Each structure stands twice: as structure tokens, then as C-alpha cells.
Amino acid sequence: MALPFNPDSKNGKMQKILPIFGLFIILALFVTAIFAPAIAPHDPYRQDLYSRLEKPGPEHLMGKDRLGRDILSRIIYGSRVSLMVGLSVIAISSTIGISLGLVAGYFGGRLDNLLMRICDIFLAFPGLLLAIALMAIMGPGLQKVVLALSAMGWVGYARLVRGQVLSLREREFVVAAHALGIGSGRTMFVHILPNIFSLLLVEMTFGMAGVITAEAGLSFLGLGVQPPTPSWGGMLNEGRMYMLTAPHLTTFPGLAIMLAIFGFHLFSDWVRDRLDPRLGKRVI
């Protein structure tokens, strides 16, 4: 039998600690990216071939890569790429998806059918495979990574918003807005959109983890950020040939990706639990 959720139990304490830990990781990631020049102990681009593949030590805590560059400094600067791509993709894809979802759900009819069939076309392709195809057409580069990931990221927002709008457009406050002569644009963005903002916030926080993973995957394949710009996925690609002789080349970038994704997932779970009224009565 399910027992009432007790915040003083061990499980309850973990539910309090884990979101704080996730938020700490996210804040540390942002602080590291913003103040990278002050935090990085060495120049991430400076090469020293005489000490290539140097193992971790007191001077270089994470060792050096195949060109003798400090791995810790490159990971710190690589956080800038991950966050910039993540925030840019979330901003672009959410703006497009929310707008199209509002229009499709609010007006319905042929317009709704057309927009949803376009979504179905995008969903017919695996997301990362579609991004790889777009990158192969456009060529590698930071801006093109953002465009490719945004092109496949808007669909989830559009379908989420459309489904919520279909359930809200017949509610009393929308009918009252129509009776008062309020226009469709104001009704959608002022009266309907604030009522689904909590769901969108959860989707965005989950989406950040997915975008970071996708950017690392594209850079690992050589289609994302190009050398010598530090990128976690690119560092994994450079170190994969030395996994047996110098495992630190892949271990530390992999840990950076894992921690970033872990932090965003912990925080997004907490946001979902706090903002979803259906989870108010929890059981253990």
C-alpha cells in the first residue's frame, strides 16, 4: 500500500538535496562560462608538443592533450560553447514552436492540420540524424549548429502548446475574452500562454540537457564547432585514439558532459514537481 509522502523521511531529504545539487551544478556551469578567462589556469590554445599527453599533475590538474594544451582550461572554455548553443537553440526553437502551436491550437481547422502534418514530417526522421544531414548540407560551424538543432527542436514545443491550447480555448476566461471583443493575438499571448508557461519552463529545462548532448555529438563527429575552439564533444573525438595510453583525454570531457546533463535533469525534475499541480500528493 502506498504511504503518504513524509518530507522528514530519508527519501524526503533526498528530494530536497538533489534539486539543490542540480542547481549548484547549473550555477557553477554558468559562472565558469562567464568568468572563463579569470578561472582558467592556462591559455587553452597554447601548445607544447614536448609535453603532449602529459598525465594529470599539480601544475596541470587534468593533464594535457595530444598537442600539449591544458585540458582543464579547455574544458572551462568549452562550457561557453555548450551554454551558448543550448541557450540559443532553446530561445529560437521555443519561439518558433510556441508561436506555431498557439496558432494551430487556437484556430484549428485546415491550418491546424497543415502545421501538424509538417510536424509529423519532422518527427519521421530521428532528431540527431536530421541535424547531421543539415550540417552536412550547410557545413560545420557554431552558428550552423544552432540552426540545425533549432530546426529539429521546435516540433516538441509546437505539439505541446497545441495540445494545451485545444483544452484551454473553450474555457470560461477565453470565452469571456471573446465576448469583450479582445483580439485573437492578445487572447493567445496574454490570456492563454501564461496558463501553460509552467509546462513550457519544464520543457525548456529538459531541452537544455538534450541540446548539450546533441552539440557534443555533432562536435564529436566533426560537424560542430571546429578546432581549435574548445568543445567537449570535440575533445572526446581528439582523445578517442589515446583511450588506452592517455585515458584522461576522454575521461574529463566526458565527466563534464555528464555533470552538466545530470544537473539540468535534477533541476528540471524539481521544477516539474513544483509546478505540476497533479503531483501535489506524492507517495513513496
Image: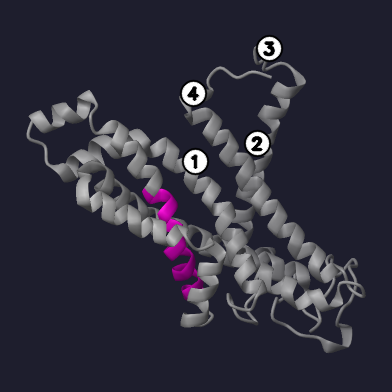
Which residue is denoted by mark 1 in the rendering? Answer: 202
Q: Is residue 130 above or below residue 262?
A: below
Give the CA distance from mark 2 to mark 4: 22 Å
Magenta-colored span = 142-158
Q: Earlier in the sequence, mark 3 or mark 1?
A: 3
Left or right: 240 as drawn, with respect to 222 = right
Three-letter amino acid code of the residue under disc 2: Ile
Q: Nearer the viewer, residue 105 or 86?
A: 105
- Residue 20 marker: 2
For the C terminus, give its image quadrant: top right
State whether the magenta stretch is mostly helix, strand or loop.
helix
Q: How crowded is the residue under tag 1: few (<14 C-alpha within 10 Å), some, or many (20+)? A: many
Query: What is the x, y in percent for residue 141?
Result: 52, 79
Kindly identify the residue that appears in the image at 75 percent across and 78 percent down: 238
Left or right: 46 as drawn, with respect to 196 = right
Query: What is the x, y in percent for residue 34?
Result: 57, 61
Numbered marks: total: 4
Q: Nearer the viewer, residue 152 or 237?
A: 152
Query: What is the x, y in percent for residue 167?
Result: 31, 32
Q: Earlier in the sequence, mark 2 or mark 4?
A: 2
Callout 2: helix, strand or loop?
helix
Tell us which disc is closer to us: 3 or 1.
3
Which residue is denoted by mark 4 in the rendering? Answer: 278
Three-letter amino acid code of the residue under disc 4: Arg
